Amino acid sequence: MERIINRKIEMEDLRHLNLFEKITKIRAKSCFEYNRTFFFCVDKRDLYKAIGKDSKNLKKIGSILSKRIKIIEYPKTTQMLSSFIKAIVFPIEFNEAFTEGENIILTTPKQTKAILIGRNKTRLFEMKKIIKNFFGKEFKIK
């Protein structure tokens, strides 16, 4: 069971984490942006509290940042890899995600492969950065 590596937090991320904590009263472990949506990672037990009643916390943070906001479970081990990626790319479906040496490989049907790569490979580069920060491995789509 591999552990998640400690990732570097940039100043902009620190501002977002502080805003999140101020509004939700919950400390987020990490945040990142993917496909014009901002993600905050919290412990599983804090998910519902972070979202708030009638999603009021999500709406408030979203209006301040002018972005869509999603709150997902922080991956503690590489065994949570598939559910972590599934939460990020939802509603897009993929076959499986697995670790092969120093690579994390995502297998997809042909129709969704183009969506996951994105125009000018923007989504692919975003996902590579996220996987590198959380798991310390390279990311590939097959």
Image (cartoon, grey):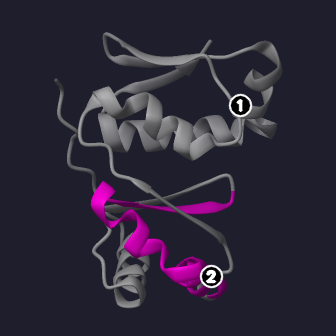
Residue 53 falls left or right of residue 116: left
Earlier-in-chain disc, 2 versus 1? 2
- Above or below residue 82? Residue 95 is above
**Pointer 2 with pointer 1, Cβ within 8 A:** no
In the picture of the structure, the residue carrying the numbered disc 1 is 117
Which residue is drawn at the image coordinates 29% and 29% (left, top)? 78
Q: Main secondary structure of the magenta part?
A: helix
**Disc 1 residue type (three-letter):** Ile
In the rendered image, which quarter contains the C terminus?
Answer: top right
**Disc 2 residue type (three-letter):** Lys
Residue 54 falls left or right of residue 21: right
In the picture of the structure, the residue carrying the numbered disc 2 is 59
The local crowd at label 1, few if under 14, some if 14 to 19, many if 20 or more residues have their Cα within 10 Å, is: some
The residues tagged by marks 2 and 1 sit, at their Cα atoms, a distance apart of 28 Å
Which residue is drawn at the image coordinates 30% and 77% (left, top)? 26
Magenta-drawn segment? 36-63
The local crowd at label 2, few if under 14, some if 14 to 19, many if 20 or more residues have their Cα within 10 Å, is: some
Question: Is residue 12 visible to us here?
Answer: no
- Camera-side mark, 2 or 1: 2
Which residue is drawn at the image coordinates 59% and 38% (left, top)? 125
In the rendered image, which quarter contains the N terminus?
Answer: top left
Q: Based on the displayed image, in which of its 4 quarters is residue 86 positioned? A: top right
Q: Which mark is residue 39?
A: none
> Mark 1: which secondary structure?
helix
Which residue is drawn at the image coordinates 65% and 43% (left, top)? 90
Q: How far across and down, in percent of the image, does residue 18 sit?
A: 35, 83
- Above or below residue 98? Residue 7 is below
Q: Based on the displayed image, in which of its 4 quarters is residue 20 positioned? A: bottom left
